[in-house]
Image: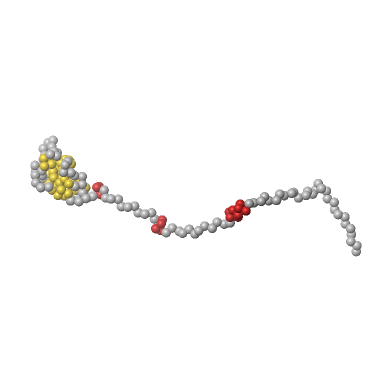
Amino acid sequence: MKPSKSSPKKTTSAAVKPPAATKPPAAIPIAAKASAEKTTQPVIKPPVSKPTKKQLTPPAPAAPAPSQNDWPAVTLEANIDVGFGNRLYLRGEGDGLSWNEGVPLTCQNGTTWKWVGNASKPFEFKFLLNDSVWARGENLLASPGQRLQFSPSF
């Protein structure tokens, strides 16, 4: 058998385009290449420890110092008719009291005068008429939480 001669096929230049010329990639500096490689690598984060119950609980606020309103009430009543236009006062050494200036008592009726205050410890006091005339006798004593009645004389 004879090899047949085949004629090469002719192609038209209009139908087939030569491959487009591609530009070679631009040169990447080594430092940029290294940083580009670093960004493509996965980032490994250190393990995060879970907070314990103690870390989640906020610290308890400090207990506030007791205020004067938290102290037990002391009620003092004086049974005396001081006369129309006169007032009864209280002086002493204790919470809210002073020996230099009196605190007025509240008139409940014609013969009953009342003072209510808070005390952190026992205290001494004395009644005064119009904050100038001292009641006779020794200083009186009251303790937190007490309700006391007196009949002072002037």
Q: Tell me if 12 is positioned left or right of 22 in this view.
A: right
Kindly tell me whether residue 139 is visible in this rendering.
yes
Observer-nearest residue: 104 or 100? 100
Observer-nearest residue: 152 or 51? 51
Rendered-image quadrant of the C terminus: top left
Observer-nearest residue: 72 or 96? 96
Q: Tell me if 62 is positioned left or right of 136 in this view.
A: right
Image point 74% across, 49% down: which residue?
21
Image point 49% across, 59% down: which residue?
47
Image point 39% across, 55% down: which residue?
57
Observer-nearest residue: 31 or 150? 31
Position of 124 relative to 5 (above/below): above
Where residue 18 appears, as percent x and y from the top left, is: 78, 49
Image point 62% across, 53% down: which residue?
30
The image quadrant that residue 44 belongs to is bottom right
* Numbered circles on residues, count: 0
Residue that lies at the very extreme toward the front in this rendered image:
30
Q: Tell me if 111 is positioned left or right of 29 in this view.
A: left
Where residue 7 appears, as percent x and y from the top left, is: 87, 55
Rendered-image quadrant of the N terminus: bottom right
The image quadrant that residue 135 belongs to is top left
Position of 28 relative to 3 (above/below): above
Where residue 80 appears, as percent x and y from the top left, is: 11, 42
Residue that lies at the very extreme toward the bottom in this rendered image:
1
